[in-house]
Image (spheres, rainbow, N blue to C red):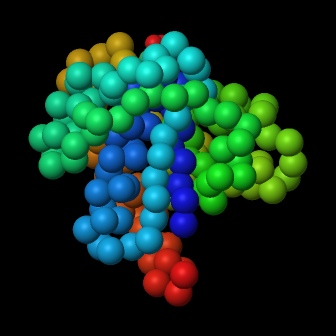
Amino acid sequence: MKILMVCLGNICRSPMAEGILSHKATSLHLPVTVDSAGTGNYHVGESPDDRAIATAGKFGVDISGQQARQFTVEDFDRFDHIFVMDTSNRRNVLQLAEREEHRAKVRLMMDVLYPNEEMEVPDPWFGGQEGFVRVFEMLDTACDRFLTDAKDQLKRS
Ligand code: 4NP
């Protein structure tokens, strides 16, 4: 199963989401590959934000080797699930979708925990370290639930 995490810059939220899900799937020996991308191109080629690296590191997740890239239309075919962090990311991704099969893969990350509530993972960019910790905890809980829900399907694949 291939999962893509998407935010705006691909330097704060989606790199943490990628690191968290990848770390959990590896620990549980589940066949999941995870990548991340940003809808914007401002930070392409950069490492994750220092605050994101530090926060993830405190929780035992190393995201320091990641490099930001921009979401492309080819990602719709390369991934089974595309998790977006907020409704603006969703709008930007859906604008590139060419068919219903593409649109059906796109889901708010927090929808895993709170279906249809339109809950967003807040952008921590303008805040301090505590915003990153809160984002990490939201993503951690959502990724746990995703893997719990997907486990049966994954063991059969
Ligand atoms: P992210 O956070 O979408 O979680 O990676 C942001 C990082 C940078 C910017 C915006 C959001 N920016 O405007 O540069």
Locate ligand 1 by image quadrant. Answer: top left
How far from the left and from the top, in percent, is residue 10? 46, 29
Q: What residue do we see at 55% from left, 59% from top?
A: 2
Is 97 drawn above or below residue 3 in the view shown? above
Counting the numbered discs, the total is 0
Q: Quadrant of the N terminus?
A: bottom right
Q: Horizontal placement of 106 versus 151: left or right?
A: right
When the figure is inspected, residue 67 is found, relative to residue 62, above or below; the finding is above
Q: Is residue 43 left or right of residue 70?
A: left
Residue extending furthest toward the left: 58
| Residue furthest to the right | 99
In the image, what residue occupies the spot 73% across and 37% down? Answer: 73
Quadrant containing the C terminus in the rendered view: bottom right
Quarter of the figure with residue 26: bottom left
Q: Nearer the viewer, residue 145 or 14?
A: 14
The spot of residue 4 in percent (x, y) is 54, 48
Q: Position of residue 58 (x, y in %)?
A: 12, 41
Give the quadrant of residue 136. top left
Residue drawn at x 39%, y 45% is 17
Q: Quadrant of residue 94?
A: top right
Name the residue furthest bottom: 156
Q: Is residue 123 visible?
A: no
Residue 34 visible in image: yes
106 lies above or below 133: below
Nearest to the observer: residue 92 or residue 68: 68
Whole-percent x, y for residue 149 in the image: 48, 73
Q: Residue at x 39, y 20 (%)?
A: 46
